[in-house]
Image (cartoon, coloured by chain):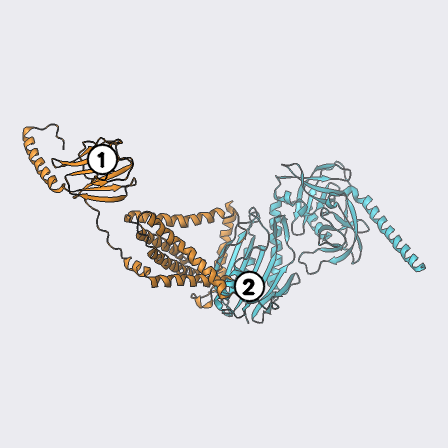
Chain colours: A orange, B cyan
Amino acid sequence: MEITSINPQQENHSSEELHHDIDDINHSHTDIIIEEISRGQKLLHRHKMSKPSINIGRGYGNDIILADPHICSEHLKIQLVNGFWQIQDQESINGTFLENPKEKKKPADKHILEDGDIISIGKSQLRIHFVDHPVAETVKFSPFESFINLMRHPIALLISVALFTLVSGTIFYLDKPIEVNFSQLLVPAIGMSLLFSLWPAGIALVSHLTKHDARVLTQLGICFAFFNLMWFSDLLENIVAFNSSSNSIFTVLIAILPIALAFCMLWLNCYIGFHMTAKRRMVVSIGITVLLFGGSYLIKYSNKPDFNARPQYNSVLMTPSFLLTPSASVDEFIEDSNRLFDKANKAAAKE
Amino acid sequence: MKYIFAFISLLFSHCVTAAEQAEEIFAQLTPSLYQIKLIDKASGEKSSIGSGFQITSDGLIATNYHVISSYARHPSKYRMEYLDHQGNTNTLTLESVDVINDLALVKREVTEPMEFFVISSQTPHKGEKLYSLGNPHDLGMIVVPGTYNGLKKESFSDRIHFTGSINSGMSGGPVVNKQAKVVGINVATSGNQIGFLVPHDKLVTLFNSYQQSPPDSIKAQMASQLMTSQNKLMSALLNSNWESKSLGGKGAIPIIDVPFIRCWGESNADKQDALILTAVANCSLDENTYISSRFFTGSVEIEFRYMQAKELGSNKFYHLYRQQIARAGAGNRAGKDDVSEYQCHHDIVMPNNKAINNKSVFCTRAYKDFPDLYDVLYLGASIDKQQQALVSHFTISGVSQENSMAFTEKFLEAVSWK
């Protein structure tokens, strides 16, 4: 509130306003919120003070006691002077500075505090808020909340994991060309479940480490629900591949399903595990999905030989009960196959 | 004792006469015999060798196509040279080829008319003594006596069965009768004194057509020969009797009744612990056409597989069945420079008799150097029985679109459940 040049009329007017302002400030700024924050601007502690003078330092006589060894025992004082909070450095060894993202940090002694100021003392940082500091809008419970709550229920979780184990066991059974007994299937099936539970466990660990709730059961519940959905999408994909001819567009559409499922799962992982803005959550989950599928596509693409002497064809077979489409006649098949020759000629002419 | 002595002396005298004859023939013919070498231009070293023999006074030399195939495919990479009995070396030019019968005509420059081999006008009679000439393994020109045993049986392209050692490097060398007239050309061996020769009349045909009009381009000549040959083969296959046979007691499969398609069978009926009973019948053309060391064509393979689950759920049966059909491959060897990648189409197909429902896959790839020729592959897997399956599969290489489609159509209609 510095006024450099004013005419008397304006002066009167503005001093009135100034007074009014000061009244306002007096009223609202008797309380001050001092937050200890980490260098990554994460909140560590929050103090709400109602005193006109606040001592900060390492000594036990202070109002706010900090453990940072680079802070003096009586480091600084924040005082309410004429309705403004002012910093007073107590001739500390390492000084008190005002952090400013745009400028270089400058000494904070005698500085009048504003809402949102960050003061650095020693290696610690303090953020100042006044009570009228606006807070972010309330985050509504997402419509998934009931689904999440259902899935984290121990019984639901148990069913999900059991279903997953059962499906992986069945797949092992189907893949083995020889006779197998139950225990031979049980070990790889359980191993598979353990392997897949690494992902939710990993996320829970990361959210724990980043000072969020771990919510292990919720993560497990959601992940296994989605893993099961992916088995189902796999089955759907097989049914479509089995029933469709080369001409069908369905095969392309169904290929999007697992990608969509993976995205949803990652989105929920973020939603459960971390507090982040909706936009950020979107970016993170899209990012990981792209990394996952794009990466596997890249690996597949980079391993692709320059020339493949083997034909690449759809060899999906399922039992007759999965056959849903009517058969084509030999003539139709011949007609469709005839079109391949042009394609082959074009492919041959390409190089 | 007297008899034994007489026998030994008889044997000895016979050997002497055979050796004398061979010696005489060799001495007489050796000026017209050559070693043919392909020299890799970049390294300056020989990359393949074979034999050849002069058939005209002006320097036309006959050899095998496979001896000079690298040059025919990549003329800029190689140089073709001959080495005569006196050790003289000079370059050769490629004049004409017969890729189906594995023959080639090359030419050397001559300053004056030279001696040459006379091609016989008669086919030998069975048991007749013949002499094969050539340079095996670069060891020098040799003569190998042997016996004419008629034409190879059950063969699509004619080959003389010659009982005598033919070794690599002798390819392209002449086989003469006692009158020193050429009756065949060394081409292949299956070891243990079994050799194969190209009959002399193929050479006569090639020579005559060369005399009338030399080919403009070797590539085009090969393309037209391959096209003609596949037409002949495919019309033989399509017009012969397709006999319906039973496979595993349940499947009805066609067996093409032509002598050059030979069938073999196998099953795992003796394996008690097998989860699936499998019976396989496969039929194929034993020969193929050599285009280069990495490119063969003209093959036909047909395979039928009957499978039956033994105490196995249909889900698992189909899962294993699916693995069985996942890796069908080409029937012939071909590389990136020779063919395109396979283009495939699949659908669920039921023939007109409604006796089977198949998942059918058809794939084809085009030849890069020979227009309108393709390799095709078909795979049919029955999907209408819970515990049984019938796989029908064929590959044909170097075939036209029209012929391959006609074959596919006939094949699809001929496979069914009984």
Return the x and y of residue B318 as percentages of the image width and height: 50, 65
Tell me the SS state at disc 1.
loop
User: Which residue is nearer to you in this view: B279 or A105?
Assistant: A105
Q: Is residue A286 left or right of residue B394?
A: left
The N terminus of chain B is located in which quarter? bottom right
Instruction: Please name the residue that numbered disc 2 is placed on.
Output: B392
User: Which residue is nearer to you in this view: B221 or A67?
Assistant: A67
Return the x and y of residue A31 as percentages of the image width and height: 15, 42
Q: Residues within 10 Å of mark 1 (few under 14, many from 20)?
A: some
CA separation in Å, label 2 and label 1: 92 Å
Instruction: Please name the residue that numbered disc 1 is placed on.
Output: A74
Q: Residues within 10 Å of mark 2 (few under 14, many from 20)?
A: many
Q: Is residue A127 left or right of residue B343?
A: left
The type of residue carrying mark 2 is Ser
Return the x and y of residue B268 as percentages of the image width and height: 60, 66
- Residue at mark 2 shares a chain with residue at mark 1: no
**Label 2 vs label 1, nearer the camera:** 1
Q: Is residue A273 left or right of residue A27?
A: right
